[in-house]
Image: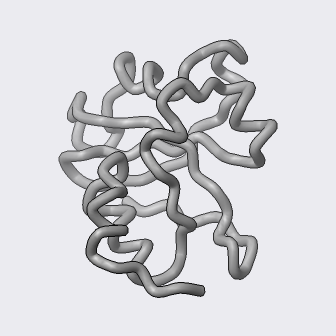
Amino acid sequence: MNKLSISDIIEISIFDDYLIKLEKHNMLQKIKPSSSEDLTIADLGKKDQRLGLKCNYCSRFRYMATHRFPPETCVKEIAASLHCARCCSDDVETFPVTRNSENGYWPAESS
């Protein structure tokens, strides 16, 4: 696997610090922000991705069950109605997560 450069890390603006840490440990495949702008719940299944939720205040990362949402729901819009279960912050984001390209595992949740 190619090493990430500083410019690669800067491009991962959706994920902020949490995913940058995962990138450094080769745990998560890089996803460019432009690829997930209009992604829907139905698209996640087609692309073998999962719905990730990250709190920007406490950095908690969890997976969400996609069956709770209609297939046409935009992944980014889901965060507007959520808050962090750990710290109760409304500063959360939802995004697509892919398997690690080297070992096929999903990135681990963290709290």
Q: Is residue 110 left or right of residue 69?
A: left
Between 24 and 34, the residue placed more toward the observer is 34
Between 52 and 28, the residue placed more toward the observer is 28
Across and down, in percent, residue 47 comes to 75, 43
Across and down, in percent, residue 84 comes to 32, 37
Across and down, in percent, residue 52 comes to 52, 45
In the picture shown, does residue 106 fall above or below 24? above
Q: Residue furthest right?
A: 46
Residue at figure coordinates x 72%, y 17% from the top left: 71
Residue at figure coordinates x 43%, y 44% from the top left: 33
In the picture shown, does residue 48 fall above or below 19? above
Q: Is residue 108 left or right of residue 10?
A: right
Residue at figure coordinates x 65%, y 35% from the top left: 65
Q: Is residue 63 left or right of residue 87?
A: right
Tell me the quarter of the picture where residue 64 sits.
top right
Residue at figure coordinates x 35%, y 46% from the top left: 14
Between 34 and 95, the residue placed more toward the observer is 34
Between 92 and 87, the residue placed more toward the observer is 92
In the picture shown, does residue 12 fall above or below 49? below
Count the numbered circles shown: 0
Q: Is residue 80 left or right of residue 6?
A: right
In the picture shown, does residue 89 fall above or below 98? above
The quarter of the image holding the C terminus is bottom left
Across and down, in percent, residue 42 comes to 74, 25
User: How does the figure colour the protein chain or chains?
Assistant: one colour
The quarter of the image holding the N terminus is bottom right
